[in-house]
């Protein structure tokens, strides 16, 4: 899977429960599929960079990162850019969470490149014959944890409606979860999601998955 990077804290509304599977859980994959089939604007990346520079006017560190992106980005390093702690990840997941079509259209070139790179690796994966274990560590508000527990008990498993990164190393997940920094009743809590990928799930799942080591 995509390796975890800083500031990849899953938001509550990135999860869809079984009761919603026929609606919102299908929206993001559908929109991504539409973007994949849609012809790219010749100057789409330039338009995105112009909008992004206006959005971050006055923030010199992010403007420098935007300049680096302009110099070095290509379709072959989309995953590498996604896993960095940059404006790009934040804008992309904000667009997906809010299902903001205008913002997703601005990010058209990147969404397609990212999805294509994941798809390419997914198609190269061999069928699984054993259970695989993954972890995702993050910091979550206590209120959202309670909501997640309550709805999970009512509706069972959840469906993801955004790009999702994990790690195979439990200790790495603990670091991203900020383990040891929060008390039991603090507003923010350390959370580690334990995810088991069954062979039957991998070989038949609708959403594409791939391993990257960066």
Image (tube, helix red, strand yellow):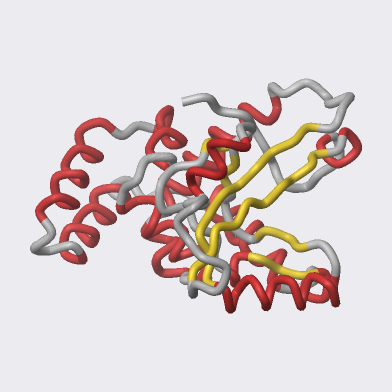
Residue at horizontal 23 percent and vertical 59 percent from the top: 52
> Whole-percent x and y of residue 56?
18, 62
Residue 129 at x, y = what percent? 89, 24
Residue 62, x across and y down, in percent: 19, 52
Image vertical order of residue 139 relative to residue 100, above or below: above
Q: Which residue is drawn at 40% across and 65% down?
A: 103
Residue at image coords 74%, 60%? 159
Give the image quarter of residue 130: top right
- Quarter location, residue 150: bottom right
Residue sitting nearer the eye, 24 or 59: 59
The quarter of the image holding the N terminus is top right
Left or right of residue 91: residue 150: right
Horizontal arrangement in the rendering, residue 27 relative to residue 74 (left or right) = right
Residue 46 point in image, percent of width and height: 24, 49
What is the quadrant of residue 211 in the picture? top right
Please state which of residues 165 and 88 is positioned toward the viewer in this rendering: 165
Residue 1 at least partly seen: no
- Residue 11 seen anywhere in this rendered image of the structure: yes
């Amino acid at each position: 899977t995509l390796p975890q990077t800083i500031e990849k804290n899953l938001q509550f509304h990135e999860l869809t429960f079984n009761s919603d599977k026929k609606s919102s859980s299908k929206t993001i994959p559908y929109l991504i599929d539409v973007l994949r089939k849609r012809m790219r604007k010749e100057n789409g990346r330039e338009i995105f960079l112009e909008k992004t520079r206006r959005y971050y006017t006055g923030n010199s560190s992010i403007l420098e990162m935007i300049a680096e992106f302009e110099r070095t980005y290509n379709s072959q390093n989309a995953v590498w850019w996604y896993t960095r702690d940059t404006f790009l990840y934040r804008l992309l997941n904000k667009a997906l969470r809010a299902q903001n079509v205008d913002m997703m259209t601005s990010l058209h070139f990147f969404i397609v490149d990212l999805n294509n790179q994941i798809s390419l690796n997914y198609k190269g994966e061999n069928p699984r014959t054993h259970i695989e274990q993954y972890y995702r560590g993050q910091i979550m508000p206590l209120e959202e944890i309670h909501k997640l527990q309550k709805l999970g008990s009512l509706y069972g498993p959840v469906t993801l409606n955004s790009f999702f990164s994990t790690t195979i190393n439990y200790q790495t997940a603990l670091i991203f979860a900020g383990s040891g920094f929060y008390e039991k009743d603090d507003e923010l809590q350390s959370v580690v999601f334990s995810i088991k990928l069954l062979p039957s799930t991998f070989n038949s799942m609708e959403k594409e998955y791939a391993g990257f080591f960066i």
